[in-house]
Image (cartoon, coloured by chain):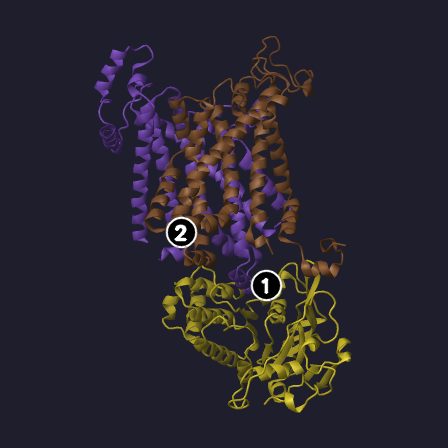
Chain colours: A purple, B brown, C yellow
């Protein structure tokens, strides 16, 4: 178990390094940071001066190592736009994004797992069809459009919820639904498929032969096994969702890390974008790592091997 | 009377339906596949014949007729779906928008399909180091936040249709690689592959004529999924203002442009979003249907 | 004994399939007294497992079960509701399945799974339940029983798992154990051990047992009563001596010729085979199902077959004594 965790940890670090290198190269090749920093009115000489001042004239690899060395110590440089340390800028915005992510995955799990279980208990029943419809629709729904519809209906027409901002829990309801609905279909399908498979297994028959009540058979014996892959999927989805929060945050004007990313890209604020790519991929890496560990812990067959 | 037209039930029972007949029966018996196929077919025809179908030039502005409502909201048949904030005919923009979405879906899926399939098949077939490297690359790719990276790169390179297509094509190969790797691993151990090797077939030949035909059904399913994915991503990028640039008629961009008038003219947002939803739904239903119909356990 | 523990009359099981109804089990009758062992023998697909699942009320949702009588110690199993059935299952009737590798829940420890039935059915505490589990694990011959309780199924071999399954079935001291081919999935060397164990424990606790098997060698050693099943019907029932000593139905005789029996089969003699295949049971089934493979089939075999015999030894065949002829007597 410990060697498994260590191996998995090593892989995670390697993946993070590669991601940071690729994104650094992408942004390095694509843009001219000196020009971006100098602004549109700057002359060629000014840009040259800035290039030398910030060390942009050095070889790319040197710059990358330099950047990485600072990044490891939590220093992501200074935002071109805000003229503030990128690290504190992101830290400030992360709480909104994390809140949104946690709410979103909770919403997704609370809707998808019961629906998946109910659908698996009675395949082809009405509830199974409703669940299937919801998941098919969820996969095809453009999240920005879904968000706008919610705003039109619940904020403008009915006036029940605030259309944008993040100042109260009510502000998070619509963004949670939009973000959660994005993760729901996959979780629902996996729960349903897992339950169907487990319910037809021999050990469920054994449990019934022992005279266990149906609820105990379903939840203690069946769901306990079917939920194992769902847990890791949920963690992976959480990583994806944080990356996808950029769309949701822009619709609902939630000033989280996603919104910051959107602004920074539009403003050519390369250090901030670079740092955000790393932060979001770190989230994904951490969540998949946790998923693997959790998975190994939940499944006795993996725990002991 | 020809033997094939025999109505003798006994003979029917003995000969049974041919594989082709069975496939046709399954295809037409699958509602999702049928619905998806028909909707996708119609939208494909609309995209191809856009110049013939569109009542107006999708770029022609007319400041005198701005934001006219659609027919069902009291508009005129001159502009069946009304006009946008620059007086452009909404139906025509919608029709040309199908071209943008489908082009992005098809070409991006092609690019990513070639990359991902090559990586996945190589990993599954050769195993060992190759597999390790490919698996690592898949992990790296999955860890990159797609929307963010795509936005950043498109923003830096400039948002043209070509740039968006290429960027999405280079980003969305992960699922191809994952599925093709698993499928190849499964097929590699089969007897007919061993048989082909035993008679001295070369590696490319084994891959092309023994492996590929047997994993093609999975490939088609992933193609549909990634087409849908690419179309949704383009729409999201364009919606955020960092994808396809105006005045190109992209559905995502149309939603974005309509957003400011959403309070008074919600149809500006509803119509392009609904069409986008319909297209992606049709593609996904096609993919699910194809998977059901071609799944080996469904063949008996 | 005055009244049988389990009494079944005319048990019928129908399964709806694509083109009609599969009459999987038809008109099963038998009685079982306390402490007795009944062996149901027959080839795969003859309906043995379905019969046992029907007794437990564990048939799938779409499978139809009917019977004139299915009485377990005064409880009518046909009309018993889910609650009543649950109380019987695991409490008074236990079942051992044929797949020890997959019949234990991979997510819980052996201890959890052993004590579950006891905690569900009897008013005992956790500690008492665990003590009982250890006691039974030792009884079924598992060493270091105490430490096994915290192990998971995947850590045990198939033979050990089947021993655990047996211990699990015995936890509540049931009056009836149904064992559905409990050894088929195991190594041949372990099969005999497990069966011997099951049989001895059954005797020791005075449990009635229904043992489903296609191993006639086993039947000859452990059975009090034998029921021979073919294509969903009991073609011959009786005491073990009667059925083995004077098999009356051509199918029984065919079966007996297929296996060597110690003391009965001569060295060097050829073993028999039964040519042909089991007929389809979809749609109306009339007459003797074995007639397509029977060497003595007559036109009358298409009609309703009378039940013949004396006392407990009954068989379904048109031939009064099963058309005993020299070539059919077990060599």
Which one is in front, B276 or C59? B276
Residues tagged by mark 1 and mark 2 found on one chain of the structure: no
Quadrant placement of the N terminus of chain C: bottom right
Whole-percent x, y for residue B209 in the image: 47, 49
Whole-percent x, y for residue A292 in the image: 38, 47
Disc 1 to disc 2: CB gap under 8 Å = no
Whole-percent x, y for residue A264 in the image: 37, 22
Say whether residue C132 is left or right of residue C207.
left
Q: Neighbour class for label 1 at 10 Å: few (<14), some, many (≥20)?
A: many
Say whether residue A169 is left or right of residue C286.
left
Which one is in front, A212 or B159? B159
Which one is in front, B155 or C30? B155
Q: State which mark lies toward you, 1 or 2.
A: 2
Say whether residue B185 is left or right of residue B67.
left
Q: Would you identify the image quadrant in which residue A84 lies?
A: top left
Q: Mark 2 = which residue? A: B202
Q: Mark 1 = which residue? A: C86
Instruction: State the SS at label 2.
Output: loop
Quadrant placement of the C terminus of chain C: bottom right
Which residue corresponds to the image point at 29% horizontal and 15% vertical from the top-left?
A38
The image shows residue C265, relative to residue C27, as above or below, that is below
């Amino acid at each position: 178990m410990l060697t498994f965790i260590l191996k998995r940890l090593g892989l995670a670090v390697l993946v993070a390094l590669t991601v940071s290198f690729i994104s650094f190269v992408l942004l390095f090749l694509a843009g001219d940071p000196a020009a971006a920093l100098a602004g549109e009115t700057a002359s060629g000489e000014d840009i040259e001066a800035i290039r030398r001042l910030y060390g942009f004239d050095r070889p790319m690899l040197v710059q990358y190592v330099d950047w990485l060395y600072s990044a490891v110590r939590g220093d992501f440089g200074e935002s071109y736009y805000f003229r503030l340390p990128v690290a504190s800028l992101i830290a400030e915005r992360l709480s909104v994004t994390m809140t949104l992510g946690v709410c979103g995955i909770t919403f997704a799990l609370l809707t998808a797992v019961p629906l998946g279980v109910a659908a698996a208990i009675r395949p082809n029943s009405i509830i199974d069809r409703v669940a299937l419809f919801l998941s098919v629709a969820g996969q095809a729904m453009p999240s920005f459009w879904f968000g706008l519809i919610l705003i039109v209906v619940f904020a403008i027409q009915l006036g029940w919820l605030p259309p944008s901002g993040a100042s109260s829990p009510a502000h998070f309801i619509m963004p949670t639904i939009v973000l959660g609905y994005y993760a729901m279909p996959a979780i629902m399908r996996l729960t349903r498929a897992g339950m169907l498979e487990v319910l037809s297994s021999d050990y469920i028959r054994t449990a019934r032969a022992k005279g266990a009540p149906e609820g105990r058979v379903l939840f203690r014996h069946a769901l306990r096994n079917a939920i194992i892959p769902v847990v890791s999927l949920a963690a992976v989805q959480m990583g994806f969702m944080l990356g996808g929060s950029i769309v949701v945050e822009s619709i609902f004007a939630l000033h989280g890390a996603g919104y910051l990313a959107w602004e920074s890209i539009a403003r050519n604020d390369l250090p901030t974008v670079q740092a955000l790519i790393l932060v979001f991929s770190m989230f994904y890496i951490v969540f998949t790592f946790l998923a693997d560990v959790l998975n190994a812990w939940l499944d006795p067959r993996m725990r002991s091997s | 009377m020809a033997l094939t037209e025999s109505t003798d039930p006994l003979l029917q029972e003995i000969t049974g339906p041919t594989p082709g007949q069975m496939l046709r029966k399954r295809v037409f018996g699958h509602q999702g596949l049928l619905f998806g196929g028909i909707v996708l077919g119609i939208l494909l025809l609309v995209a191809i014949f856009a110049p013939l179908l569109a009542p107006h030039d999708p770029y022609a502005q007319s400041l005198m007729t701005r934001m006219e409502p659609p027919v069902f909201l009291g508009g005129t048949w001159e502009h069946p779906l009304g006009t946008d904030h620059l007086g452009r005919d909404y139906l025509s923009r919608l029709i040309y928008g199908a071209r943008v979405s489908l082009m992005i879906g098809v070409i991006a899926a092609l690019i990513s399909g070639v990359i991902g399939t090559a990586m996945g098949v190589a990993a599954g077939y050769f195993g060992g180091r190759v597999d390790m490297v490919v698996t690592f690359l898949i992990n790296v790719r999955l860890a990159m936040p797609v929307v963010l990276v795509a936005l950043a790169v498109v923003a830096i390179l400039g948002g043209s249709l070509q740039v968006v297509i290429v960027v999405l094509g280079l980003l969305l190969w992960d699922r191809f690689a994952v599925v093709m790797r698993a499928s190849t691993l499964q097929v590699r151990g089969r007897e007919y592959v061993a048989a082909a090797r035993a008679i001295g077939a070369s590696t490319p030949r084994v891959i092309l004529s023994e492996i590929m035909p047997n994993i093609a059904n999975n490939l088609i399913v992933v193609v549909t999924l990634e087409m849908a994915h690419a179309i949704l991503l383009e729409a999201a990028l364009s919606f955020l203002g960092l994808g396809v640039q105006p005045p190109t008629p992209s559905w995502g961009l149309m939603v974005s442009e309509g957003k400011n008038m959403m309070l008074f003219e919600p149809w500006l947002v509803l119509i392009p979003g609904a069409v986008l939803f319909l297209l992606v739904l049709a593609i996904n239903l096609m993919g699910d249907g194809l998977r059901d119909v071609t799944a080996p356990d469904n063949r008996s | 004994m005055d009244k049988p523990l389990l009494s079944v009359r005319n048990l019928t099981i129908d399964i709806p399939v694509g083109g009609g109804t599969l009459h999987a089990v038809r008109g099963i009758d038998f009685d079982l007294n306390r402490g007795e062992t009944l062996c149901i023998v027959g080839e795969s697909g003859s309906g043995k497992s379905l019969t046992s699942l029907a007794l437990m009320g564990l048939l799938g949702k779409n499978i139809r079960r009917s019977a004139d009588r299915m009485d377990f110690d005064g409880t009518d199993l046909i009309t018993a509701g889910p609650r009543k059935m649950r109380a019987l299952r695991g409490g008074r009737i236990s079942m051992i399945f044929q797949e020890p590798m997959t019949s234990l829940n991979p997510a819980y420890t052996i201890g959890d799974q052993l004590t579950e039935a006891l905690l569900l059915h009897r008013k005992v505490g956790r500690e008492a339940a665990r003590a009982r589990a250890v006691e039974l694990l030792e009884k079924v011959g598992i060493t270091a029983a105490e430490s096994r309780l915290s192990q998971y199924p995947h850590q045990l071999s198939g033979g050990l798992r089947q021993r655990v399954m047996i211990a699990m079935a015995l936890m509540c001291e049931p009056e009836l154990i149904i064992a559905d081919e409990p050894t088929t999935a195991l190594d041949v060397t372990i099969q005999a051990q497990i069966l011997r164990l099951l049989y001895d424990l059954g005797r020791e606790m005075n449990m009635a047992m229904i043992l489903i098997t296609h191993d006639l060698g086993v039947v000859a050693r452990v059975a009090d009563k034998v029921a021979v099943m073919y294509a969903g019907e009991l073609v011959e029932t009786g005491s073990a001596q009667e059925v083995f000593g004077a098999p009356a139905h051509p199918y029984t005789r065919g079966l007996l010729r297929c296996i060597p029996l110690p003391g009965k089969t001569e060295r060097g003699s050829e073993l028999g085979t039964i040519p042909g295949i089991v007929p389809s049971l979809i749609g109306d089934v009339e007459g003797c199902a074995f007639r397509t493979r029977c060497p003595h089939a007559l036109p009358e075999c298409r009609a309703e077959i009378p039940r013949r015999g004396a006392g407990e030894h009954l068989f379904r065949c048109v031939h009064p004594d099963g058309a005993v002829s020299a070539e059919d007597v077990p060599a």
